[in-house]
Each structure stands twice: as C-alpha cells, then as structure tokens.
C-alpha cells in the first residue's frame, strides 16, 4: 500500500502529474492517470481497538449518477 496525504486535490494532482516524479518511483510509473480516493471504514490506533463505520456511498450507483447530473 502506498499512503500519502495532501493539503488539497490540486496539490495531489500537481505533484504526481510530473513525469520525473513518476519515473523516480517504480510504483508510480505504473499508476493510472486518473483521480483516486478511498473512504475510511475502519480506524485503529497502534495497539487499540478497531473502530468501524458504515459507508456513505450510495447503494445504487446509477441513482447517484442521476442525482449528480441534476
């Protein structure tokens, strides 16, 4: 897993769009040039108990697309 944290989406895109950055890291050279992200569904401090949450995602992707198109 590759974990990075950015101030905002623009910083992320500007940093990883540079060809030299992608070639300096073999893993990044294989990355797809598309937006990515994830939803945190569980968190755990070192040695702690995992805390789980439900997803905020729409169960029906087509309904979500229709709503976003409004």
Image: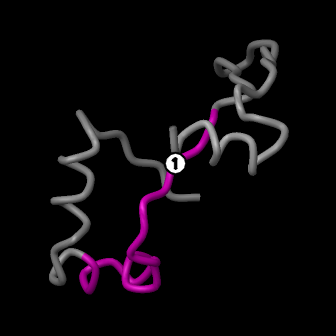
Majority secondary structure in the magenta region? loop
Q: Position of residue 25 (x, y in %)?
A: 33, 77
For the point 75% across and 13% down, the residue is 48
| Element assignment for label 1 | loop
Q: Is residue 30 shown above or below 11? A: below
Residue at figure coordinates x 82%, y 43% from the top left: 60
Give the residue drawn at x 45%, y 77%.
Answer: 31
Q: Does residue 35 sit above or below 57 in this rendering?
A: below
Residue that badge 1 annotates:
37
Task: Please state which of residues 65 and 22 is positioned toward the viewer in this rendering.
Answer: 65
Question: Within the magenta stretch, is there residue 33?
Answer: yes
Task: Judge left or right: residue 51 versus residue 28.
Answer: right
Seen in the picture, residue 69 relative to 30 is either above or below; the reply is above
Please say if 5 is above or below 13: above
The quarter of the displayed image where residue 47 is located: top right
User: Which segment is the magenta one?
Assistant: 22-39
Q: Return the residue nearer the eye: 4 or 38.
A: 38
* Quarter holding residue 55: top right
**Residue 5 appears at what percent x and percent y?**
35, 40
Q: Quadrant of residue 54?
A: top right
52 is within the stretch colored magenta: no
Could you tell me residue 30's position as x and y percent?
46, 85
Can you give x and y, in whole percent of width and height, for residue 70 in the image?
51, 38
Closer to us: 31 or 48: 31
């Amino acid at each position: 897993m590759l974990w990075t944290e950015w101030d905002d989406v623009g910083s992320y895109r500007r940093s990883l769009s540079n060809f030299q950055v992608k070639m300096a890291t073999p893993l990044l050279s294989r990355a797809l040039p598309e937006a990515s992200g994830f939803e945190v569904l569980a968190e755990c401090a070192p040695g702690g108990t995992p805390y789980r949450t439900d997803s905020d995602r729409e169960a029906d992707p087509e309904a979500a697309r229709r709503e976003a198109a409004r």
